């Protein structure tokens, strides 16, 4: 298994979908004081990936553009399938919600693991179920909401929710043996937000302004190019976000939102009997900020997003964040997107990059570590019914290494997605 596939698998292990109980009406049932909602989606795409010929100059550790054989598949897109259960009630002047989400897919998985291993396109193989969402909330419109459990993070959340490839494919990672998710624009314009155990508080809406902040399960730092294991955590991860929404989405005027987020945590090398090399940093702090704006007017929609951080890595939080010498790396990126809806057809253009910079103690000479993942996407999204959307996308992806090696990939995806 090559390094690109391993990283794609690591990202796919955490890939998520829109919390469907919030995105569509779903199927509602009233049971005493509780309102029960079932919602979800099923999707599938024919995907063709055209790869660069593998050579001595196409090795990019952490790159997403394939180098080797071309491939065709029938697979899930950025979203796996989903069945999300939610129950809400009001008790003692509090709004209470409990949500549990199950996320299977159409692709067979290795050893019965949905996204923890590569795909397994062989006879007698089966997919699995990924239970990645389980939380409850309590609060009131007058003072806000407390959430406890596992759910989507704050940093990078709006970037993926507003990504047009959420309904489609984006970069078709591991297309020869697909798991239950593609990459979309993850690692190609934003760092993946992830699903994380958390305790968060969201304020009431003050004239369009909403603040959310909380503590999260800290994540281990993981490197593809060195064995350092920063897996000791003596404090939680912290995330916070500020958003402002304006206008009326039901009107023909200008409406949209602006947001900023932050994520930060400390990670340390665990204690061991043998001393670490002299000068090696035994702990680091990783912090990143992001922000964006989304505008919608008369069928035209535009998104501009960017992020910057140090010690947070790229593609996923705290992936490839430090050098072999223990120094932190900087990373940044963003994307721009424009769509226009003609009656039932939405046409979209999107371009994004994610850059990883070397630490002060590293050299680019002959270094195969990722420098940049970039992709451009042309998408067509046709609303066949209010529940069914047909999708066609063309995706061009390029990965470049610090030492100058590079690889290119061209993908075509055609399929559809049904929400209920």
Image (cartoon, rainbow, N blue to C red):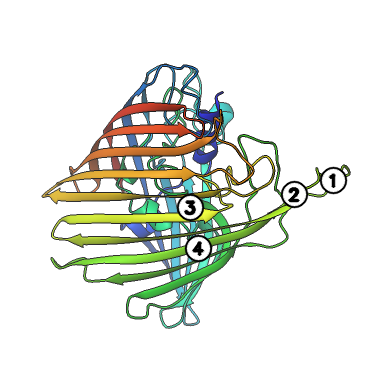
Give residue 193's mark.
Answer: 3
Q: Position of residue 135 (x, y in %)?
A: 53, 60
Q: Is residue 254 above or below residue 231?
A: below
Q: CA distance from mark 4 to mark 1?
A: 32 Å
Q: CA distance from mark 4 to mark 3?
A: 11 Å
Q: CA distance from mark 2 to mark 4?
A: 24 Å
Q: Is residue 114 visible?
A: no
Q: Callout 1: 10 Å neighbours few (<14), some, many (20+)?
A: few
| Residue found farthest to the left | 343
Dot 1 or dot 3, earlier in sequence: 3
Q: Quadrant of the N terminus?
A: top right
Q: Callout 3: 10 Å neighbours few (<14), some, many (20+)?
A: many
Front residue (pair 211, 79): 211
Q: Is residue 284 visible?
A: yes
Q: Are marks 2 and 4 in contact (CB under 8 Å)?
A: no
Q: Please name the residue shown 64% across and 47% down the image.
A: 221
Dot 2 or dot 3, earlier in sequence: 3
The residue identified by callout 1 is 272
Give residue 269's mark.
Answer: 2
Q: Position of residue 183 (x, y in %)?
A: 42, 39
Q: Are marks 1 and 2 in contact (CB under 8 Å)?
A: yes
Number of the front mark, 1 or 3:
1
Total label count?
A: 4
Q: CA distance from mark 1 to mark 3?
A: 32 Å
Give residue 262's mark.
Answer: 4
Front residue (pair 256, 326): 326
Does dot 2 land on a helix, a strand or a loop? Answer: loop
């Amino acid at each position: 298994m090559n390094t690109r596939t391993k990283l794609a698998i690591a990202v796919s292990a955490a890939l998520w979908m829109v919390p469907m109980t919030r995105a569509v009406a779903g199927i509602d049932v009233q049971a005493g004081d509780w309102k029960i909602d079932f919602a979800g989606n099923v999707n599938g795409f024919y995907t063709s990936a055209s790869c660069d010929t593998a050579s001595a100059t196409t090795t990019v550790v952490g790159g997403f553009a394939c180098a080797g054989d071309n491939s065709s598949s029938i697979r899930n897109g950025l979203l796996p399938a989903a069945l999300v259960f939610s129950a809400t009630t009001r008790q003692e002047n509090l709004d209470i919600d409990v949500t549990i989400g199950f996320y299977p897919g159409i692709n067979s998985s290795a050893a019965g693991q949905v996204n923890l291993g590569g795909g397994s396109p062989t006879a007698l193989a089966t997919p699995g179920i990924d239970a990645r969402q389980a939380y409850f909330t309590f609060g009131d419109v007058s003072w806000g909401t407390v959430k406890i459990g596992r759910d989507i993070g704050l940093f990078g959340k709006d970037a993926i929710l507003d990504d047009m490839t959420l309904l489609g494919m984006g970069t078709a990672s591991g297309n020869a043996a697909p798991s239950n998710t593609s990459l979309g624009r993850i690692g190609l314009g934003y760092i993946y937000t992830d699903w994380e155990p958390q305790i968060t508080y969201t304020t009431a809406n003050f004239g369009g302004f909403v603040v959310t902040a909380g503590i999260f399960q800290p994540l281990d730092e993981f490197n593809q190019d060195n064995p350092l294991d920063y897996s000791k955590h003596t404090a939680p991860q912290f995330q916070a976000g500020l958003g402002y929404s304006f206008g009326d989405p039901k009107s023909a005027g200008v409406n949209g939102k602006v947001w900023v987020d932050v994520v930060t945590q400390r990670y340390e090398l665990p204690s061991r009997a043998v001393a670490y090399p002299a000068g090696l940093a035994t702990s680091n702090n990783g912090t990143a900020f992001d922000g964006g704006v989304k505008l919608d007017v008369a069928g035209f929609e535009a998104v501009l997003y960017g992020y910057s951080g140090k010690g947070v890595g790229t593609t996923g939080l705290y992936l490839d964040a430090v050098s072999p010498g223990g120094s932190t790396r900087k990373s940044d990126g963003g994307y721009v997107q424009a769509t226009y809806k003609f009656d039932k057809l939405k046409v979209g253009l999107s371009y994004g990059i994610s850059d990883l910079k070397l630490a002060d103690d590293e050299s680019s000479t002959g270094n195969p570590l990722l420098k940049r993942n970039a992709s451009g996407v042309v998408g067509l999204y046709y609303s066949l019914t209010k529940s069914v959307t047909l999708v066609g996308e063309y995706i061009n992806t390029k990965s470049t290494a610090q030492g100058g090696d590079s690889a290119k990939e061209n993908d075509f995806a055609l399929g559809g997605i049904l929400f209920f």
